[in-house]
Amino acid sequence: MGAHNFTDYILGTDVREAYDRAVDDAVAEYGSSSNNGTISTTDGYLVLSDTPLPLQEAIDQHRTLWDREPRIEKRGYCGAIPVLDTKRRVAAPIPATPGGYSTRPQAVEAALASLIQQGEHIADFARDVQGGFVYDEAGRITSGSVTVTLTGTQLVHAGWLFFGWAAS
């Protein structure tokens, strides 16, 4: 079997969670074959930098590391570089309140109250908010949790660029 290179950019500051999400997404889209040509054919990741970089700089750096880093190999480890971005992904529980929330935006706003930073916003509610909402008999949201992609104005460590050789 052959190999080809791959690059995946995943939002999330925890490298293990980001890698696992990238693998899960690849399996969901391309199947679980050991030769599906995705990150799911790797055995894990190696963090190759402690300093987050803007996405384009991380892409430029990974291009030089692809062939120069001997630990990056087919059916072995992929590389991981922390990335600065104006987007970040956060998860939060929906706090309980007497009577619940009448709308999803109200519940999401309450969940993000202590997490959202000045200048951040949800760019597209339908695309950027995922969650499990629990409703009472009256149709009001009483609890649950959300994962939200926030867009801001400042660069922060927001994700990971994974790259390597995929079995195909």
Image: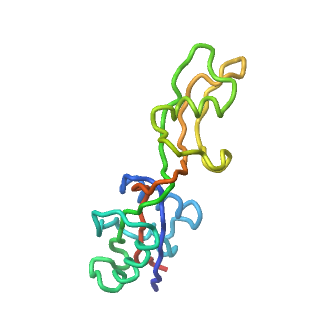
Nearest the eye: 147 or 125:
125
What residue is shown at x 27% (from left), y 77% (from top)? 71
| x and y percentages locating residue 85 in the rendered image | 47, 59
Q: Residue furthest right?
A: 138
Q: Is residue 133 above or below residue 76?
A: above
Where is residue 9 shown, x and y percent of the image? Answer: 48, 65
Residue 46 versus residue 36: which sits nearer the camera?
A: 46
Q: Position of residue 139 (x, y in %)?
A: 71, 22
Measuring 45% from the left and 68% from the top, which residue is drawn there?
55
In the figure, 35 relative to 19: above or below?
below
Coloring basis for residues: rainbow
In the picture as drawn, the residue positioned furthest to the top comes out as 98
Is residue 103 depicted above or below 161 in this figure? above
- Pinpoint residue 43: horizontal percent, then vertical percent: 35, 67
Question: So how many labels did they put on this image?
Answer: 0
Q: Residue at x 68, y 46 (%)?
A: 126
Residue 48 placement: quadrant: bottom left
Classify 165 as above or below 141: below
Could you tell whether 50 is left or right of 126 in the image?
A: left
